[in-house]
Image (cartoon, grey):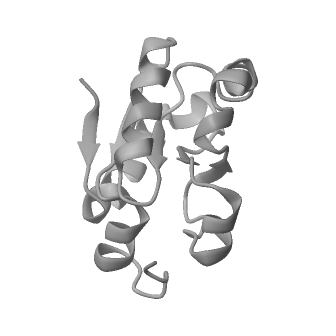
C-alpha cells in the first residue's frame, strides 16, 4: 500500500528524508510531477529542498530505466499530479518496479495550492 502524504505534511517528510539520507548522498528527495506539459505551464511547485522531476504519466513505463539509473531505487520520491489519482497509480507502479521510498501527494497540486503555497494557481 502506498503512503498518502498530505501536502501540509510535505515539509516534514522532505526534511526527514533529507536527514535520513544524510551525508551518504547529496541527492535531495524528489517530487515526481506526472502531469502533462500544459498543466505545468498552468501551475507548478517551486523547488525548495527537493528536486523536481517532470515525466508525464504516459511516459513512465518507457522511462523507468532512466529513473532507476538517475535516482536509484532507494531515493525518496513523492509523486504529484492534479488531484492525486494519476500520481497514486505511478507511485504503485514505481513500488512494483522496485522503488522503496515512494509516497503519493494526496490531493495533488490542487491541495498543494490550498495547504502549502496559495500562489500556485488552481485549475
Closer to us: 7 or 80: 80
The quarter of the image holding the N terminus is top left
| x and y percentages locating residue 13 in the rendered image | 34, 48
Among all residues in the image, which is located at the extreme bottom?
Answer: 119
Q: Can residue 4 be seen in this view?
A: yes
Total marks drawn?
Answer: 0
Asked if residue 15 lies left or right of residue 62, the reply is left
- Residue at horizontal 76%, vertical 25%? 66
Q: Can residue 16 be seen in this view?
A: no
- Residue at horizontal 58%, vertical 40%? 57
Q: In which quarter of the image is residue 82?
A: bottom left
Asked if residue 74 lies left or right of residue 36, the reply is left
Asked if residue 23 lies left or right of residue 104, the reply is right
Closer to us: 116 or 21: 116
| x and y percentages locating residue 48 in the rendered image | 55, 65
Asked if residue 58 lies left or right of residue 101, the reply is right
| x and y percentages locating residue 11 in the rendered image | 36, 60
Relative to 38, does residue 117 appear above or below in the rendering? below
Q: Quadrant of residue 71?
A: top right
| x and y percentages locating residue 31 in the rendered image | 53, 49
- Residue at horizontal 58%, vertical 70%? 44
Amino acid at each position: 500500500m502506498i503512503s498518502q502524504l498530505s501536502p501540509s505534511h510535505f515539509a516534514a517528510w522532505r526534511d526527514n528524508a533529507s536527514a535520513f539520507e544524510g551525508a551518504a548522498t547529496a541527492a535531495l528527495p524528489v517530487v515526481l510531477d506526472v502531469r502533462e506539459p500544459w498543466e505545468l505551464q498552468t501551475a507548478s511547485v517551486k523547488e525548495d529542498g527537493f528536486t523536481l522531476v517532470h515525466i508525464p504519466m504516459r511516459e513512465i513505463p518507457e522511462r523507468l530505466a532512466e529513473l532507476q539509473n538517475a535516482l536509484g531505487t532507494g531515493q525518496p520520491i513523492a509523486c504529484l499530479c492534479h488531484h492525486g489519482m494519476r500520481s497514486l497509480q505511478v507511485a504503485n507502479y514505481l513500488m512494483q518496479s522496485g522503488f522503496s521510498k515512494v509516497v503519493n501527494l494526496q490531493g495533488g497540486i490542487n491541495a498543494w495550492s490550498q495547504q502549502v503555497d496559495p500562489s500556485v494557481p488552481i485549475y
